Amino acid sequence: MLELEDVLAARERVAETARHTPLDYSHTFTRMTGAEVHLKLETFQRTGSFKIRGATNRIMTLSEAEKEAGVVTASAGNHAQGVALAATRSGVDAKIVMPKHAPISKVRATENYGAEAILYGEDYDEAAERAHEIEEAEGRTYVHAFDDEKVMAGQGTIGLEIMDDLPEVETVVVPIGGGGLISGIATAIKGRNPDARVIGVQAEGASSVADSLQKGSVQTLDSVDTIADGIATRSVGQRTFDVIDARVDEVVTVSDSEIAVAVSYLLERGKTLVEGAGAVSLAAILGSKFDYADDEVVVPVLSGGNIDMNLLTTVIVRGLVETGRYVKLKTVLKDRPGSLRKLLDVIADAQANIYAIQHDRTSRDIGMNATEVELDLETRGPEHVDNLLDSLRENGFDVEVLV
């Protein structure tokens, strides 16, 4: 099993490539949660993600023959970029198989770092199958995204940095996809301070670990569905599962809505862009998914910031909806002068701001003398939304909340 000595050795290998990322005390999230929250900002890492650490450690331990033959891997995006950059820096040819629906920004970044990107399959697991075919056909070394002790050790250097920068840390909260990140961090944290807790977080739509721990063996999901594409794997690895079982104190899950709220808060309050997979750790704290004491020193690892711009728009809107900052309404009016004005007056009196309005007389779901109106509104919070709805209904409007 992976040990602290492996992580210490990895730190020497990755030092020239991976950055020692900031550990930033957050007044905002400390106030919101009651814990003392310090953000580990792997969003500022080279390639925008922690993955460069494990990829560098693995490639630097290849034999000369393995380097000559080249490497291949599968990735949803972040590991791809890490392997691409690490391979390029070591003069190693790299082929990266990515799911067909991988964010275009991550595909382009992977190519820009010098690797050949091959799009194949619906998710990480199907991409991995294709990558193994290339491994066998071309004699390349497969650089696993997580189930490799050299990769796990590289990711564990994050834990060493946390302990160096904040020795008094009591709880470290870490995203889980395939388990490489949390395996390395847990090994480093527990190796330095066995009393410190390590909490793992998965997305509800890709949550294989809790079932695996309960059954005592790796369980594989039939499919995954989450906005956190960086941790959208059907199962953890066998090596990572063994470490998680031995060294991780608790594993919890968060919903896509909770992830969206965390991403939105980090962007608005923390001035930091974090992808869904990187935000699950903070989402777990904000959602009180595990018990922590007042003033407990907690470090959520924000593992990456490579979010697709199209997805970001959706995530921000979802976050605003969940926090009562945005609401979409539908109502039906009598198609006569003054009806729309009366509706808008009620909205204005309630101090809601109109983003967009759609006025439709042609809907088949309404009478010939009626018109359907949809409104996108900016609001100030859940209480404001409730007051707005009460005011509309008191004034005779039958309102349906669409979003």
Image (cartoon, rainbow, N blue to C red):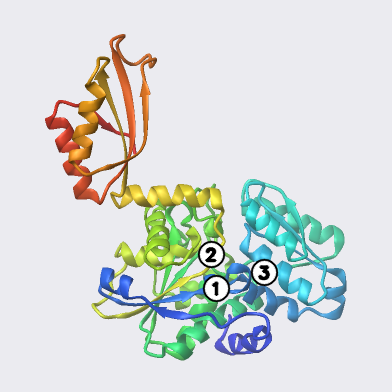
Vertical arrangement, residue 322 with respect to residue 47, above or below: above
At a point 64% along the width and 73% down the height, the residue shown is 52
Whether residue 226 can be seen here: no
**Amino acid type of the residue that numbered disc 3 sits on in the rendered structure:** Gly
Which residue: 37% across, 52% down?
319
| Secondary structure of residue under mark 3 | helix
Q: Which mark is residue 82?
A: 3
In the rendered image, which residue does mark 2 sit on? 305
Label 1 Cα crowd, 10 Å radius (few <14 / some 14-19 / many 20+): many
| Between 45 and 375, the one nearer to me in the picture | 375
Which kind of residue does numbered mark 1 sit on?
Phe
Residue 356 in the figure: left or right of residue 188: left
CB-based contact (under 8 Å), mark 1 and mark 2 = yes
Q: Is residue 327 above or below residue 24?
A: above
Place residue 7 in its image quadrant: bottom right
Q: Earlier in the sequence, mark 2 or mark 3?
A: 3
Q: Is residue 176 left or right of residue 379?
A: right
Quarter of the rendering containing residue 136: bottom right
**Marks 2,3: beta carbons within 8 A:** no
Quarter of the image where one finds residue 61 = bottom right
- The percent position of residue 379, horizontal first and vertical second, equals 27, 47
- Measured in 3D between alpha carbons, the distance from the residue under mark 2 to the one under mark 3, in whole angstroms, is 13 Å
Q: Disc 2 on helix, strand or loop? A: loop
Q: CA distance from mark 1 to mark 3?
A: 14 Å
Q: Residue at x 19, y 49 (%)?
A: 383
Question: Label 2 amino acid?
Answer: Gly
| Residue of label 1 | 44
| Mark toward the viewer: 2 or 3 | 2
